[in-house]
Image: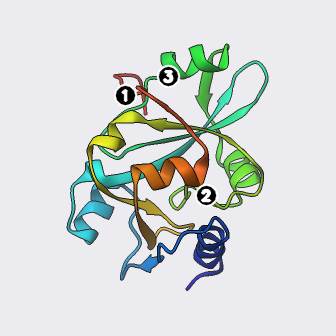
Amino acid sequence: MSDAAQRVQDAIRALGFENVVLELEHPVKTAQAAADALGCEAAQIVKSLVFRGVTTGTPVLVVASGANRVNTDVLAALLGEPVEMANPKLVRQVTGFAIGGIPPVGHAQPLDVVIDEDLFAIGDLWAAAGHPNSMFPLTAPELAVMTNGRVLNIRGSATP
């Protein structure tokens, strides 16, 4: 197991959960590729995206269904300022992970987390585990407890 995936596994255990990180045969860099590798739907893939406030630079982690786009207007209203995707340097700085394997837990620094409410209608989910070829299974209620995230309707036509 990669060091990054092991950090995620350790974080899951430290939170009191028994979910097990699975290493895939090949790296997956999109929700659809992950779904294909796992034999599930893209909606079951949890994507963890870091946004930042344009004015303050405050980072926030958005955890959304792989089938959904994030409505940045809703996110901006929540933060009280316009938002944009964080650049790769900031993503690594605040999460400790590179884009393509960002997990919802085990970050380098505490992050406010917003969870896509659509995840609660899905059932079994899969989230990245620190590396493009590592995933772990979970449910939306587990995700909410693990991240202490706020559940909101953030699905929309804005990107990504």
Q: Residue at x 58, y 40 (%)?
A: 149
Q: Earlier in the sequence, mark 1 or mark 2?
A: 2
- Front residue of 41/20: it is 20
Instruction: Kindly identify which residue carries mark 3.
Output: 72
The residue that disc 1 covers is 155
- Rounded to the nearest angstrom, the CA distance separating label 1 from label 2 is 21 Å
Sooner in the amino-acid sequence: mark 3 or mark 2: 3
Q: Which circle's residue, 1 or 3, is located before the other in the chain?
A: 3
Most distant residue in the bottom direction:
1
> Which of pointers 3 and 2 indicates the residue nearer the eye?
2
- Residue 27 picture location, percent across and down: 41, 72
User: On residue 105, which mark appears?
Assistant: 2
Mark count = 3
Q: Is residue 96 above or below residue 1?
A: above
Reply above or below: 117 against 56. below
Quarter of the image where the N terminus is located: bottom right
In the rendered image, residue 98, in percent from the top left (x then y), is placed at 62, 59
In the image, 131: left or right of 158? right
Report if the CB atoms under discs 1 and 3 are less than 8 Å apart: no
Give the side of residue 114 with respect to residue 45, left or right.
right
Q: What secondary structure is marked by label 3?
A: helix
Query: Which amino acid lies under the numbered mark 3 shown in the image of this protein?
Result: Thr
**Tag of residue 7:** none
Q: Which residue is located at x 51 percent, y 75 percent?
A: 18
How far apart in space, not on screen, are marks 1 and 3 (Cα)? Answer: 9 Å
- Label 1 amino acid? Arg
Mark 1 Cα within 10 Å, few/some/many (few <14, many 20+)? some
> Which quarter of the image is occupied by the C terminus?
top left
In this rendering, is residue 70 above or below 110?
A: above
Marks 3 and 2 sit apart, C-alpha to C-alpha, by 22 Å
> In the image, what residue occupies the spot 61% across and 73% down?
13
